[in-house]
Image (cartoon, grey):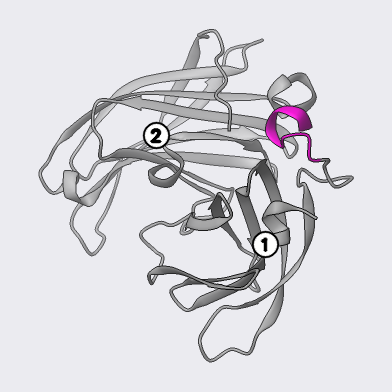
Amino acid sequence: MKRIFYGLLLFTLTSSPTLTITPAFGQTEIRKERVQFVRGANSAIVESSITGYEIADYVLGAREGQYMNVSMATDNTGNYFNIFMPGENEVAMFNGSIGENQYEGIIPKSGDYRVRVYMMRSAARRNEIANYRLEMIITEAGNSSANSSENIYDNDALVEGSNFNATGNIPCAMTTSQPTGSCFFGVTREGNGSGIVTITKLDGRTRAIFFENGKATGYDMNQADPGEFSVEKQGDLSLVRIGEERYEIPDAVIFGG
């Protein structure tokens, strides 16, 4: 997607006590800070650092239908951010290690979103330091030229009442023993077979699968995901497996037609 640049605006951070959790790979500190835009501003910039397994969560409130743009510059190649939807603690709606630390999109539901800055295990176990600059922008969708169908969706019209270029259902299953069912999807197309297919799983959570040039290349993974990602092409159908999850995505979903 096209990058968008805004002027720098001041912000206020309200720090919460540092939390400490102990996942399987070692001791992790989570530093929580609430982001509050100053009156009249629509963006905030954080310049900070983390070391080793330390994690920083930046919490900001947003309303359904607003536009969010989050980007991060860092001096450590193992430093990324994820974004979690309100109430979600396991599956990230965006993973910076796939999205190159740049997110743009329409807010799917109102509430507190967490922008989690972290280090990949390979860098964390070496106790490396990452200095980063995180910019978070929230605007009304109608006020941002970045949200026009021409800029984001390459002139592909939106489904009325949604932020997707197409919606429908695809065959899916959540476990190897489960018979194939039907999952709702919405797709945002970037043109030439690239874009994001967002699937509502049978348990109500969402799974985003990324496409480039008609090929599924990754998904919104995090440390809670249980298995490997694989793609098998059968004619005009992509069979995508994520651990035990499986999805059957026709080419028409990402290309249109």
- Count numbered badges in the picture: 2
Give the amino acid type for the residue marked by disc 2 in the picture: Ser
Q: Nearer the viewer, residue 31 or 126?
A: 126
- Which label sits on residue 251? 1
Q: Residues within 10 Å of mark 1 (few under 14, many from 20)?
A: some
| Residue 185 higher or lower than 84, as above or below | below
Left or right of 160: which side holds 202? left
- x, y percentage for residue 85? 57, 48
Q: Residue at x 59, y 54 (%)?
A: 214
Left or right of 225: which side holds 178? right
| Residue 11 higher or lower than 180, as above or below | above
Q: Nearer the viewer, residue 208 or 149?
A: 149
Element assignment for label 1:
helix
Q: Nearer the viewer, mark 2 or mark 1?
A: 1
- x, y percentage for residue 117? 36, 38
Label 2 and label 1: CA atoms lie apart by 46 Å
Element assignment for label 2:
loop
Residue 153 counted in the magenta span: yes
- For the record, the magenta segment spans 149-156
- x, y percentage for residue 107? 67, 39
Which of the 4 image quadrants contains residue 143?
A: top right
- x, y percentage for residue 100? 42, 37
Q: Residue at x 31, y 25 (%)?
A: 132
Give the amino acid type for the residue marked by disc 1 in the picture: Asp
